[in-house]
Image (cartoon, rainbow, N blue to C red):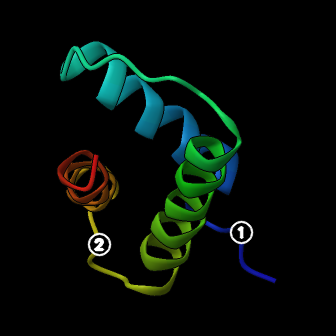
């Protein structure tokens, strides 16, 4: 079986780092927010692992912007 390029945990770590450090946004990690972020991380991992040409940071940053726009 082929190894995946990125795990959900790695995607979540990158997602949180991007939002908090690079975008300087404060997050209140309540249950709903954490659920939404882990769902986005799973979506990012699935997308990155299923598409040969997917660039990990671009996929995660796009999802991060969708999340931030919905806040």
Q: If you read the primary sequence from the N terminus, does the residue marked by circle 2 or circle 1 appear first?
A: 1
Can residue 61 be seen by looking at this rendering? yes
Residue at point 26%, 78% (across, down): 53
Instruction: Tally the numbered discs.
Output: 2
How far is the residue under mark 2 from the one under mark 1? 16 Å
For the residue carrying disc 1, how many other residues have a C-alpha within 10 Å: few (<14), some (14-19), or many (20+)? few
Give the residue drawn at x 17%, y 52%.
69
Label at residue 3? 1
> Compared with residue 66, is residue 47 higher up or lower down, i.e. above or below?
below
Q: Point out the image quarter for the N terminus.
A: bottom right
Q: x%, y% of residue 47?
A: 44, 78
Q: Position of residue 13 (x, y in %)?
A: 55, 33
From what the image shows, is residue 15 above or below residue 20? below
Q: Which residue lies under the disc numbered 2?
A: 54
Would residue 28 appear left or right of 15 to someone viewing this image?
right
Q: Which mark is residue 43?
A: none
Query: Tag 2: Cα neighbours inside 10 Å, few (<14), some, or many (≥20)?
Result: few
Based on the displayed image, in which of its 4 quarters is residue 62 positioned?
bottom left
Toward the viewer: 66 or 44?
66
**x and y, in percent, of residue 43 in the image:** 51, 72
Instruction: In the rendered view, tell whether residue 52 sits above or below residue 35.
Output: below
């Amino acid at each position: 079986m082929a190894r995946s390029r990125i795990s959900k945990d790695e995607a979540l770590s990158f997602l949180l780092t991007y939002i908090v450090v690079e975008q300087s946004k404060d997050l209140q990690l309540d249950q709903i927010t954490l659920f939404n972020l882990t769902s986005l991380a799973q979506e990012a991992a699935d997308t990155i692992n299923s598409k040969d040409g997917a660039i990990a940071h671009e996929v995660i940053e796009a999802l991060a912007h969708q999340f931030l726009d919905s806040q």
